[in-house]
Amino acid sequence: MATNGYSNAQCNGDSLEQLKHFKTTNGVVDDVDKFVQKALELTIREGLEKIKDRKTPVINFKTPNELEKCIDLKVYDEPENHEMLLQLCQQVFDYSVKTGHPHFFNQLYAGLDPYGFVGQIMTDVLNPSIYTYEVAPVFVLMERVLLKKFCDIIGYENGDGTFSPGGSYSNMLGLNLARFSKFPQVKEKGMRNLPRMVALTSSHCHYSNKKNASLMGIGTDDLIAVNTDERGRMDSADLERRIVAAKNEGAVPIAVIATAGTTVLGAFDPLNEIADICQKYGIWLHVDAAWGGGVMITDKHRHLCDGIHRSDSVTWNPHKMMMAPLQCCVFVTKHPHILKECHSIHVPYLFQQDKTLYSSEFDVGSKVIQCGRKVDALKLWLMWKARGTNGLKRRVEKAFENARYLSELVRKREGFKLVMEPECTNVCFWYLPKRLRNTKWNLNNEEFCREVAAIPPRIKERMTERGSMLVGYQPLGNLPNFFRMIVINDQVERSDMEFVVNEIDEMGKDL
């Protein structure tokens, strides 16, 4: 495998030498407290300090067979000693992807907020489950404050919500509430004797919507895909046509799922136009703002979500554009009682109604589907306290500035071609090696498209082996594979954007 200056740690090699200082005078770390202390020191060094060095590989890639030989993954009847456990912890760092690294652009999350990191550690030490006030008093109140803040930002006057284990789950809650709102009897009677129900969303929506339609018994065939414009935004005229067609077939449209920041192109659907249509036909409007919701805390980019206050529910993932540690996902609705009406079940051993120390409204577990639920509010709260809304706003605005600069570099650089001007911080572009640069650009030419599509996988393979950065790629509709750069991390500078184009050109020019 190529290294090109990026030294890959060898199995059980030099990196483990760094652990020698973990030994006590007798050569063995035999105290649990000392083990925890040393493991935390290791975590801080590897997870917070080393990733600031851009020469640190984003990944020290091994194939599955190689990795199984590098790390003893088996568990045994007898315990390992602490020195061995520390060595194993070191190996976990050695061979894991450094998502906090400034050159990790692969997913819709990146970077590491140190305040959020501390909040996550505190949460894990306390290990609460947030379903009743009596077992999580601080976190119930903390969560209520944050949820109200999100509702205020969106424009819900008396909304309600919950933290959830992912944007996919939040989207399911939106669809579930939409169905309950139209047919409240579904809670007790299920789907029997109910008409055929359909939901509508754009052809560029997140794939979770199909999974949710399947899980809820609506069916993927009745999740109707609405056409998009050339920028990937939902076509509101086609939405209305499909609603009318479904109604003419005897179906009941229960939800429209709009997207604020699509996964690939970062497109924002026209929410005011969609809200007009939903209001006209009495349909629940859910907005999947898992990715793009962060723009709402800014002044410059909030307009991308104009009309979101007219929706019935919203998915928003602060672990994406706002850089909270995974996982940190919010679901809110403008209807203050519907979560409890839809999800509450009489559970006398947990949600007692005769408590006198506090009101049962603080037993928040009654309004969600889970029983046990990890606290995800503390890391966000501590991060927000430390940075303020203005600090988080600057973080989002910097990501947009970096994305604009990268777009300028792509426009000007020979061999690079933008798929389209970015609306969000998704920068999508093709790359052509030298041998193709004199070929006429023609996406109607099948042979040309095959050539173009073959380039990103080859470059991705090289950059992964080298460990220099991670960038995603994909086709879209009739478009051949292109790179999809996701810019989030506030540690990223203009020089990193220059590194991206230089590195891709260096690894691909001879293909």
Image: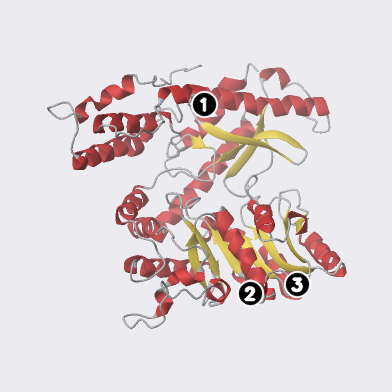
Q: Is residue 148 visible?
A: no
- Mark 1 residue element: helix
Amino acid type at mark 1: Pro
What residue is shown at x 43% (from left), y 52% (from top)? 324
Query: Which residue is at the far front?
Result: 77
Q: Quadrant of residue 123?
A: bottom left
Q: Is residue 68 visible?
A: yes
Q: Distance between the residues labelled 1 and 2?
A: 47 Å
Q: Callout 3: 10 Å neighbours few (<14), some, many (20+)?
A: few
Amino acid at the residue labelled 3: Leu
Q: Which residue does the numbered mark 1 point to in the structure image?
A: 64
Q: Is residue 490 above or below residue 235?
A: above
Q: Where is residue 244 in the image (x, y as percent from the top left)?
A: 84, 68
Measuring from the top left, give residue 428's x and y in whole percent.
64, 39
Q: Which of marks 3 and 2 is in front?
A: 2
- Residue type at the position of mark 2: Glu
Quadrant for residue 13, please give it: top left
Q: Is mark 2 on a helix, strand or loop?
A: helix
- Number of residues whose C-alpha sits closer than 10 Å to that of mark 1, classed few (under 14), some (14–19) or many (20 or more): few
- Read off the residue under disc 3: 194
The residue pinned by badge 2 equals 188
Q: Which mark is residue 502?
A: none
